[in-house]
Image (tube, rainbow, N blue to C red):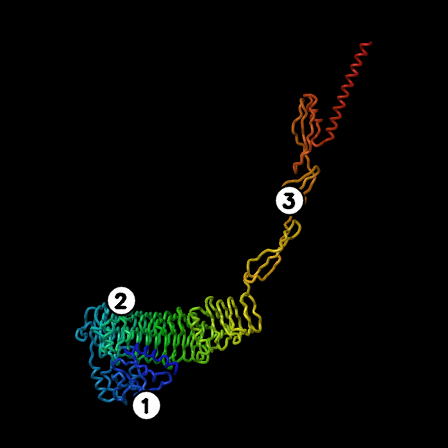
Amino acid sequence: MRQYKRYQRFLCMLTAAVVGTMLPCTAMASGMPGDTEYSYIAHGMAGYTERQEIKGDISEQEKSGDLQSCTISGDCVLGNGQSGPCITENEKNRSVSPAASTGIATDNRVQKEPEVSSAGTQAQIAKKETAYAGQTLTVGGINAFETLTGEGWSFQPGTNTLTLNGYAGGAIHAEGFSLTVALAEGSANVITSDISQNGSALGANTFGYSDDSLTLRGEGAGASLLIDGDLQGIYAQGGVAVQNCNLTVGIRSTEASEEKVSDGTMSSFTFGCIRAGGGLLIEDSNIDLSSQKGTENNKKTYAGIGAATGRVDIRNCSITIDAASTGIQSSNKPLNIENCTLDIRGDETAAIVCQWSTVALTGCKGTVASGGAQGVGITAQRAKGSITLTDCQLSLDSAYYGIMALADSVYLNSSTLDFPAKTRYGIYAADKIEASNGSAVNGQNCTFVCYMPAESGCTIDEGSAVNGVQLFNGKKNVTVLGTFTFLKEYMAAVGDVMEGKLFTVDEGAEATVAEDAVLDITEAASVSIEGKLINHGIWRLNGEKAVNTGTIVNWRSVEETADTAIRNNGAAYSVCTALFPVQGNAVIPMHKESQAVEENRIEPTCTSEGSYDSVVYCANCGEELSRVQKILAVSGHSYSQEWKNDAESHWHECSVCGEQASKAAHNFAWVTDREASVQAPGLQHETCTVCGYSKAAAEIPAPNDGTDTAASDAEAPKTGDSSSIVFWTVSAVLMGVGSVGGTVLKRRKNKNSRMT
C-alpha cells in the first residue's frame, strides 16, 4: 500500500486525461490495489468521469468528503458540489455492451421497454426515454433531418448514415442517436471547429454517457478526414469506431477554449482528439493525432485517444500521436493494440495507459515516448492490470518509467525493447517480470532495467536476455544481468541506492565500468561477482564484504577499504601497475607489451648459422615478458662471376671467404698476333679459351723465299706444337752451317784448281 500512496498524485494526473478535471487525491484511496470488490460506481455529470469505487458502508465514503450522500435510486452528490446518477452493475454492463464498446452504431432505445433496476424508479426511466427520443444532426450548422444533402455531404435517416464526399466545413453534431459517417472512396474531407460554436468537431456536442455511438469509416481506398479544432475532435457518449480511413486530428488550445474549460462552462471536456464515453475501435486506418497547449494551461489534460467505460481495440493501423499529456487511455476495460506501427508520445503523463484493466500489445513496432519528469511509456494502474507484449519491437523513450505495471506483472513474449535515452526504470512491476521465447531487453541507458518490490528478480528463459541492472526485493538487491556498462552519467543514481544492498554480477553476466566512471559500492552489504566484471574506471569496495567466484579484469584501479581484501575464489587479472590485494587465488598481472628488441646478435657465415634474442619488455613496469632465440640461416658462399687463375688453372672465388670453386686446368689455343712474311717473322701466343689467361708471345718464322710457300706452309708448325718450332729452329741452324761449310769447300776447291 505504501508503494501506491507514493504515486497517488501521479495517478490523479493520469485519471484527468479522460476525466476532464483533476480528482481529489483522496478519491483514489479506495481504488488502490487490494480494494477490488465493489457494488456500485458513481459518475460525475460535470466531468467527474473517473469511476470511484463505492465499497462497503456508504458512510465511510461520506467521511472522506468525496461522496457526501448516495442513494441507490437517486443521484450521487460529489465533494465538488455537483451530482450524477448512480448506476448499478447491470447498468454498468449495459453501458459497455458489445455495440457500445466497439463503436458500432446501434439505436434501439426508443423501441425497447423501459428497464427497471433494483435501484431505479419508473419515473427516472421514463424521463430518460423522453430525452432519448430527441434526435438532431447538424452539418456545418444545417439541420440534416430537414435538409438531407449539402455541399460535400448527404444524409440517409433510415440508416443514420452521413456520407462525406469532399466536405469542407464546420462541425458535425449528432445528438440522441448513433451515427455512421461514411467517407466516400478517394475523398478528402475537412472539418473545422472552434470553441465559440462547438465543444467537439464531430459527434456529440454535449457531455454525458449513453449508448449513442459514432462510426467513422472509409468506403474505399484513399478516403481521408482532417479535423482542426481547439477543444475536442471526435466525441461520442457511447462507443467510437474508426475504420479503413486516413484520419488526421489537430487540437490546439486557445485562450478562449481554455477559459471555458477552466471557468466550468465546459469543464467536462478535455483537449482530446478521439474520446469515447463507451469503448473504442480503430482498425485498418492511418491515424495522425496531435493535442497541444496553445497557451500555458496547467488545469486540463491533452489526450490523443480516450475511452471511459469500454475497451480499446486498435489493430492493423499506423498510429502517430503527439499529445501534451496522454497518448492513449482506457479507463475501465482492457486496452489492446495489434499489428500496428506506433509513434506515440504523451509528454506530461504517459503514452499508453489503462486505469483499471490490462494492456496487451501484439505484433507492434515503433516508438512509445513520454517526456515528463515522471513520464511513463506504457502503464497499467490497478490490480489485475498486467502488461503483455507479444512479438513486439519497441523503442521506449521515457525519462522515468518505460513500462509500469503498478499493481501487477509484465510479460514479454518474443519481444525486443530498446531504451534510446536515459531512463530511470526500464520496467517496473509490482509482482513479477517474465521474459520468454527470445525476448530481449536492452537496458544500457536505464539506471535500473527492471525494478520489482518482489523478493525474486525477473524470470528469463534460456533463449531470452535482459541487459542491465535490476533492483528488487524491496530495493535490497542490485543485480547486473546480461551485458551492461556502468557509465559516468548513471553512477550517482546507482550510488544513491547502494547502502545496505546486496550487489551481484549474475552468473553469465558481464559488467563493465567505463573509463571515466566510478563504481562506488563501498556501502553495499555484500558484493558477489559470479559473472565477469571488467573495470576501465575506478571500482571502490569493501574487500571484506566481497567474494569473486567469476572473473575480475582490472585495467585501471580497484580501491579497497584499508586493510581489506577480496576473497578471490575465481580468476582475477589486473594491469601490472595496479595490482590489488586479494585472499585466495593470486591476481594475475597483465602487462603491456612493448615492441620486441634484438639482443646478442651473432651474424651467420658462409658455412655456419647465426642467431639473436628477440626480447619483449612490459611498457609499464619494464619486466621482461618473453625472450626467444632467432636463428639466422647459413649465408652460403658468394662466388664471383669472374674467373680467378694462375699459370696452371682457373676457378671462381667466394667474395666472403675466398673459397675456390669450379677449378680446372687451362684450355689453351693459339692466337696469331701478326702473320709472318718474307720480310719479317710473325707473332703468336696461347690463350685459355675458358678464363682468358694468356702465355707469352712466340715468333712465327719468316718463309725462305716467296715461291715455296706451300712447302713453308706444309712445314710450318701447328698451333700448340712446340716440337715443330724446335725442329724448324734446329733445321734452320743446320742449314746455315751447311751453307757456310759448302761455301768454304767451294772456295777451297777453286783455290786448288787454280793451283793445278
Circle 3: residue type? Ser
**Quarter of the figure with residue 585:** bottom right
Figure check: 255 above or below 115: above
Q: Secondary structure at mark 2?
A: loop
**277 vs 515: above or below:** below
The residue at 22%/88% (across/down) is 123
Q: Is residue 252 left or right of residue 437?
A: left
336 versus 72 height, above or below: above
Residue at label 3? 655
Which residue ends up furthest to the front in the rendered image? 562
- Against 739, residue 574 (above or below) is below
Q: Which amino acid lies under the numbered mark 2 shown in the image of this protein?
A: Gly
Q: Which residue is mark 2?
A: 186
Mark 1 near mark 3, Cβ–Cβ under 8 Å? no
Mark 1 and mark 3: Cα distance apart in space:
119 Å
Q: Residue flagged by tag 1: what amino acid is it?
A: Asp
Q: Is residue 442 visible?
A: no
- Of tags 2 and 3, the one toward the viewer is 3
Name the residue that disc number 1 marks: 57
Disc 3 crowd rating (10 Å Cα; few below 14, some 14-19, many 20+) is few
Q: Earlier in the sequence, mark 1 or mark 3?
A: 1
Name the residue nearer the viewer: 665 or 524: 524
Residue in the foreground of this view, choosing between 198 and 362 = 198
Q: Earlier in the sequence, mark 1 or mark 2?
A: 1
Q: Residue at x 30, y 78 (%)?
A: 16
Nearer to us in this view, 372 or 716: 372
Q: Is residue 168 visible?
A: yes
Specify the quadrant that holds the C terminus: top right
Left/right placement of residue 560 relative to residue 724 reads left
Q: Position of residue 541 (x, y in %)?
A: 50, 73
Using the image as rendered, state which of residue 682 and residue 408 is in the foreground.
Answer: 408
- For disc 1, the neighbor class at 10 Å (few under 14, some 14 to 19, many from 20) is few
